[in-house]
Amino acid sequence: MKRKIFKSKPFKFMTLLTSLFIVTGCHSPNSSITSSNQHLETAHSPEVEKMDFSHEPENVIYFAGGCFWGIEQLMQHIPGVIDAQSGYANGTGKEDADYKTVITGTTGFRETVRVEYNPEEVSLDALLLAYFYVIDPTLQNRQGNDIGTQYQTGIYYTNDKAKETVERIAEIERSRSEAFYVEIGPLLNFYPAEDYHQDYLAKNPGGYCHIPTEEIVLFSQLRIDPGDYKKPAAEAIRDKLTAKQYEITQNNGTEHAFDNEFWNQFEKGIYVDIVTGEPLFSSTDKFESSCGWPAFSKPIEEPSIIELEDNSYGMKRTEVRSRAGDSHLGHVFENDPESPNGIRYCINSASLRFIPYAKMEEEGYGYLLDLFE
């Protein structure tokens, strides 16, 4: 499975000198893909009709993530999601809220999915972080093969509680990328898309989707909810950590090889983010390594680890950070001869807290005991 790596530099396009809007990808499978040196922008800023969402339930959020077919299917596969409906958001108004008009690129509408979820089963944090896992936030008016203003990414909320969560997660995600083009703001209007767009990929399994099938399957099987392990405020992090832990997790520091707590420990249990407590690695995937740091062949769940390009110190490496806490953990390397699968997550001990198997239930990690069966 290809691991997720956010780009550290934005994907750049040349601005078109005309008002022509080209549609490619999921809705025009026979169209040729526009050259990557073209940049599509709205020709004007149309006035937007505003709707009243004061009666919308708190447990609803709106995602624009490129083609709505893929985002809809992703959300429908996440346990705890009640309903996902494709539609058009934040455009001119009802008269223009149809596919043929939206694809002209002049309406301001974004292909958007209304997601209703059960907060007792899945958190808004989890939905937001799943969304960011499958999109590329460095692209403007584009995702995958789909180009046009209707494919602009965005997250739209209808209440203050959701606003706080969206802005908190967006701040974390923004810090992970030099370019961030995801629209964050209130929902102004929303109109359901035509019936043939609803559940499109369920009705057409071979249809185009810019989200890889393996990523959708991945999120259908997850048990770790990042909403249970929220990142504390900056001052709380400083108070909680030792000077060494703070330097490594918050300032991308590195501890000395063979001189750290867990490099040669193989006791049964799990390793969690020292900042948030989010489960990251299991002793079942820890292997003896000559590197001098804790080495794991894989995380407990792949999306709990965020990978970023790291070109510091004249080297080209892949940094790994925790999903909810955004803690610097270490780096991941391929083709490691000592690893059972060739992958080595080389992690700083100071980024981790070890939970022995015997204490997992007591400390709230009983739901992961079956990792050791």
Image (cartoon, rainbow, N blue to C red):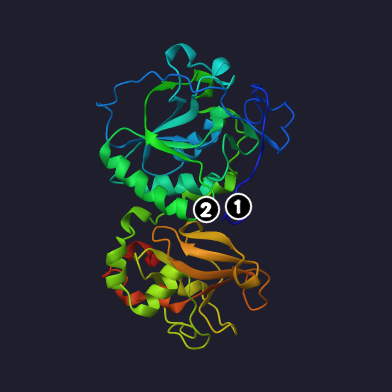
Quadrant housing the N terminus? bottom right
Find disc 2 in the rendering and name its residue.
Answer: 177
Please tell me how crowded label 1 is: few (under 14), some (14-19), or many (20+) other residues with Cα within 10 Å: few
> Quick one: which residue is furthest to the front in this view?
17
- Residue 331 in percent (x, y) is at 56, 70
Amino acid at circle 2: Ser
**Residue drawn 28% across the image and 72% down it:** 240
Where, by quadrant of the figure, is residue 156 drawn? top left
Of the 4 image quadrants, the one containing the C terminus is: bottom left
In the rendering, at what x and y percent does residue 190 appear?
A: 40, 23
Marks 2 and 1, how far apart at CA: 7 Å
- Disc 2 or 1, which lies upstream in sequence? 1
> Which residue, given by chain and number where applicable, does mark 1 sit on?
9
* Badge 2 density bin: few <14, some 14–19, many ≥20, Cα 10 Å: some
- Residue drawn where x is 65% and y is 31% of the image: 25
Residue 246 falls in image quadrant:
bottom left
Q: At x 24% / y 26%, what residue is drawn?
A: 55
**Mark number, residue 321:** none
Left-right relation of 318 to 78: right
Q: Residue at x 68, y 26 (%)?
A: 17
Element at label 2:
loop
Element carrying mark 1: loop
The amino acid marked with disc number 1 is: Lys
Residue 274 against residue 172 in the figure, above or below: below
Work out whether residue 111 can be spotted.
yes
**Res. 206 visible in picture:** no
Residue 57 picture location, percent across and down: 27, 32
